[in-house]
Image (spheres, rainbow, N blue to C red):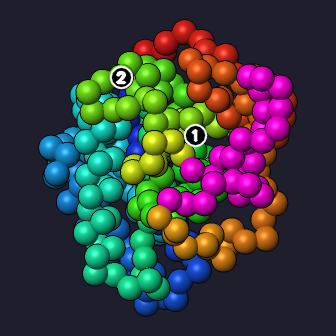
């Protein structure tokens, strides 16, 4: 029988451009992905019995028990993943390069004999697969990962400026997922003051357009590689913005302004 739904912190990580690699490289990348994950969890000081994992081929679903501090996930764990990826990058060839998209959400999930399920899990996967997150990582040539937190996690945890988390390094993106569901997430890229690839366009004061990969967008710092082949030829994703605390608020292709709501528990 399925277990009763229980609150968890939900992390999903996914390897960039995984399906473009050969079968032998995919097998090697999967092994390296788990090496990085296990080392990062240990480095972040999270007990191994406080989490469960579910393999997703080119990524991993990780369920952290409610008692794990979310600041530890958004701060120490993300930094540890970045550190461990840097160590791998020092010995990997370009063909074997491994970068992650990482999402953090929270909510009720249920477990049965075959794995975990719940709307919160679905949302976490929509976040990690979001086109804005893919575009940001493509533009961040010297980055090893791009991280997106759900709006709920940002408002309840990240925006409060805890010592190990910098809310000023995040920008919001709103996108339309499957079945017309509109989702807002907050993106950051370790090593960058703000997510690259979101170039300001023309507009009245306080408004404008951010076009991922558009002409005039800033080049990746350090002169990183061009976008992966799987991203080339895709239409640009355009985000409309407003102002929140002096920072541009990114949205999706629909003209709207996202305003702050109450802090959710």
Horizontal side, residue 262 vs residue 156: left or right: right
SS of the residue under disc 2: loop
178, 196: nearer the viewer: 196
Q: Residue 231's image quarter?
A: bottom right
Residue 100's place in the image compared with 256, above or below, is below
Q: Residue 162 has which mark?
A: none
Marks 2 and 1, how far apart at CA: 24 Å
Look at the image and tell me in which quarter the N terminus lies. top left
Quarter that holds the C terminus: top left
Residue furthest top as drawn: 262
- Expressed as whole percent of the image width and height from the top left, the position of residue 151 reads 55, 28
Q: Main secondary structure of the magenta part?
A: loop
Residue at 43%, 76% in the rendered image: 97
Residue 130 locus on image (x, y percent): 63, 50
User: Residue 131 lies in magenta, yes or no?
Assistant: no
Q: Secondary structure at mark 1?
A: helix
- Residue 116 in sight here: no
- Going 42% across and 71% down the picture, which residue do you hit? 98
Residue 46 in view: yes
Task: Name the disc covering residue 123, or none.
Answer: 1
Does residue 236 appear left or right of residue 67 in this picture?
right
Q: Which of the 4 quarters of the picture holds residue 255?
A: top right
Q: Nearer the viewer, mark 2 or mark 1?
A: 2
x then y, percent, for residue 160:
38, 19
Q: Is residue 215 above or below residue 242?
A: below
Q: Which residue is mark 2?
A: 161
Eyeballing the image, is 47 above or below 184?
below
Q: Point out the stretch of residues depicted in magenta.
A: 196-221
Give the class, few, some or many, for how many residues have Cα within 10 Å of label 1's Cα (few <14, many ≥20). many
């Amino acid at each position: 029988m399925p277990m009763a739904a229980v609150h968890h912190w939900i992390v999903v990580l996914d390897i960039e451009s995984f399906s473009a690699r050969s079968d032998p490289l995919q097998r090697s990348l999967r092994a390296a992905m788990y090496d990085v994950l296990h080392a990062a969890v240990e480095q972040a000081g999270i007990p191994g019995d406080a989490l469960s994992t579910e393999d997703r081929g080119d990524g991993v679903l990780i369920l952290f028990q409610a008692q794990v501090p979310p600041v530890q996930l958004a701060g120490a764990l993300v930094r540890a993943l970045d550190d461990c990826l840097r160590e791998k990058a020092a010995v990997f060839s370009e063909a074997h390069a491994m970068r992650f998209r990482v999402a953090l959400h929270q909510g009720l999930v249920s477990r049965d004999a075959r794995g975990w399920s719940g709307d919160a899990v679905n949302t976490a996967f929509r976040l990690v697969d979001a086109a804005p997150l893919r575009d940001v990582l493509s533009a961040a040539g010297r980055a090893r990962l791009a991280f997106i937190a759900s709006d709920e996690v940002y408002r309840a945890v990240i925006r409060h400026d805890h010592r190990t988390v910098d809310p000023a390094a995040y920008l919001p993106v709103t996108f339309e997922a499957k079945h017309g569901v509109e989702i807002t997430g907050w993106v950051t890229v370790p090593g960058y003051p703000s997510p690259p690839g979101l170039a300001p366009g023309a507009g009245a004061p306080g408004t404008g357009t951010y076009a991922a990969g558009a002409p005039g967008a800033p080049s990746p710092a350090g002169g990183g590689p061009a976008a992966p082949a799987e991203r080339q030829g895709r239409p640009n994703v355009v985000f409309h913005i407003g102002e929140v605390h002096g920072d541009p608020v990114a949205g999706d292709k629909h003209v709207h302004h996202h305003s702050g709501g109450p802090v959710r528990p």
